[in-house]
Image (cartoon, rainbow, N blue to C red):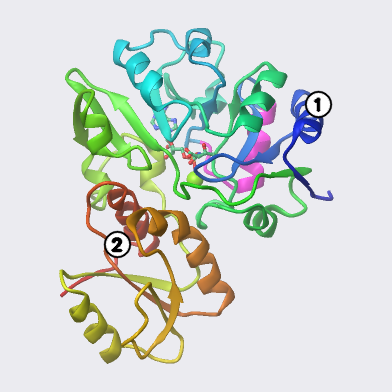
């Protein structure tokens, strides 16, 4: 199959809508990362997504909707706080889990009785969903296990020949996948941190952060969100996350422990003797550039990547969560 890349516009979304209505799948831009979309109400389409990505079938997909009202079409009961959060954060990087109804097939929900919903912040993608008339199920458009794609060419590198169409909407502004929350008696629980931070959610309700966000799962630990149990975001190089307060300590560690195949992700290359790759000078930029930097490190043939652990607050918590997985929990504490 030939994979076509088209800039996203009024013309290409019509083409994509026809393709999706016929049961095919296509990559779409969102503000977080690129998604690999299919008809979320069609078991056949959803199966194509799992095959193209090589994704385990028990890892459920997010349903992307263009209007909060659509929640009532596909959810058995919409939790009251969901409406408040939707009003504040949608369109945007917040995914909410709630009971699904029978219209949503088991293939989409990975066999769970719940489904995840999100309204992405891309006006063409929202128009595309309206044209389709059904919610688009879309996981990140990478091969399972690799860093999520934040540019159309990342999708092409992973899925060329496996999908018919990629809609190119440029670089994703957030760069990390959405914040995934479940509702609890008292408020919400963050299962995956993202652009909508605990602090932002905290203005509306009580916020709990799942232990698995910053720690590994115990041997027999059951993941509340199935996605959390898989190895994730891993480039070919071995990633080491260095936890230390002081930047000077980080530089000293790197300078004592590098070789010619080591790459350091940093915005202050000055005193570092190893090769460096520039990456983020604010926590927002770190989030936006992380996945792209990990892919670039592979292209450069790096064998070892050193990166300083971000502070676990604001969007830094999301960067920490992706890094610790990319590092397969290899954290060096100085
Ligand atoms: O920003 C995003 O969320 C991107 C864009 C394309 O929207 N999508 C994305 O999808 O990251 P994916 O499939 O890579 O991650 C979805 C996460 C997984 O960890 C999955 O386990 C979790 O959401 N999830 C989905 N439905 C769930 C459910 N019913 N219960 C618990 N976790 C769920
Ligand atoms: Mg993913």
* Residue in the foreground of this view, choosing between 160 and 306: 306
How far apart marks 1 and 2 lie (CA) works out to 43 Å
User: Measured along the vertical axis of the image, is residue 256 above or below residue 189?
Assistant: below
Q: Is residue 334 left or right of residue 41?
A: left
Mark 2 CB lies closer than 8 A to ligand 1 = no
Q: Main secondary structure of the magenta part?
A: helix
Residue 114 lies within the magenta run: no
Expressed as whole percent of the image width and height from the top left, the position of residue 229 reads 36, 46
Tags 1 and 2 touching, CB below 8 Å:
no
Name the element at disc 2.
loop
Quick check: can you spot residue 220?
no
Residue 288 lies left or right of residue 209; in this view the side is right
Question: Quick one: which residue is furthest to the right in this view?
Answer: 2
Q: Residue at x 61, y 47 (%)?
A: 53
Quadrant of residue 40 in the image? Answer: top right
How many numbered tags mark residues here? 2
Q: Position of residue 100 (x, y in %)?
A: 45, 15
Task: Residue at 25% x, 37% y: name it.
Answer: 198
Res 140 seen here: yes
In the image, residue 23 sits, relative to residue 300, either above or below, namely above
Residue in the image at 23% along x and 21% along y: 184
The magenta stretch spans residue 47: yes
Q: Secondary structure at mark 1?
A: helix
* Image-based side of 43 in relation to 121, left or right: right
Q: Residue 56: give x, y in percent of width and height.
A: 52, 43
Q: Which residues are magenta?
A: 44-57
Residue topped by disc 2: 329
| Label 1 sits on residue | 18
Quadrant of the rendered image containing residue 205: top left
Who's the residue at 74% across and 55% down the image? 160
From the viewer's perspective, is residue 271 above or below residue 112? below
């Amino acid at each position: 199959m030939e994979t076509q890349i088209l800039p996203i516009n009024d013309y290409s979304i019509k083409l994509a809508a026809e393709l999706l209505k016929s049961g095919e799948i296509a990559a779409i831009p969102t503000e977080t990362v690129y998604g690999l979309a299919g008809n979320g109400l069609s078991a056949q389409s959803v199966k194509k997504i799992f095959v193209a990505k090589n994704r385990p079938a028990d890892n459920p997909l997010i349903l992307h909707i263009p209007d909060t009202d659509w929640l009532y079409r596909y959810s058995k009961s919409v939790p009251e706080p969901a409406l408040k959060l939707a009003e504040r954060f949608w369109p945007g990087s917040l995914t909410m889990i709630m009971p699904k109804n029978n219209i949503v097939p088991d293939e989409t929900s990975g066999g769970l009785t719940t489904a995840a919903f999100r309204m992405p912040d891309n006006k063409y993608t929202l128009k595309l969903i309206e044209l389709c008339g059904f919610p688009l199920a879309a996981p990140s458009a990478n091969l399972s296990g690799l860093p999520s794609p934040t540019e159309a060419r990342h999708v092409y590198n992973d899925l060329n020949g496996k999908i018919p169409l990629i809609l190119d909407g440029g670089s994703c502004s957030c760069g990390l996948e959405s914040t995934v929350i479940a509702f609890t008696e008292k408020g919400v629980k963050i299962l995956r941190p993202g652009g909508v931070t605990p602090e932002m959610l905290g203005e509306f309700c009580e916020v709990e952060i799942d232990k698995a966000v910053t720690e590994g799962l115990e041997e027999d630990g059951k993941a509340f969100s199935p996605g959390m149990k898989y190895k994730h975001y891993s480039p070919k190089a071995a990633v080491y996350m260095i936890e230390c307060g002081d930047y000077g300590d980080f530089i000293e560690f790197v300078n004592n422990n590098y070789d010619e195949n080591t790459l350091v992700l940093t915005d202050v290359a000055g005193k570092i003797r190893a090769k460096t790759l520039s990456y983020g000078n604010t926590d927002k930029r770190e989030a936006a550039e992380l996945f792209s930097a990990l892919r670039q490190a592979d292209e450069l043939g790096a064998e070892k990547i050193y990166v300083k652990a971000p502070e676990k607050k604001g969007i830094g918590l999301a960067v920490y969560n992706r890094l610790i997985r990319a590092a397969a929990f290899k954290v060096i504490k100085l």
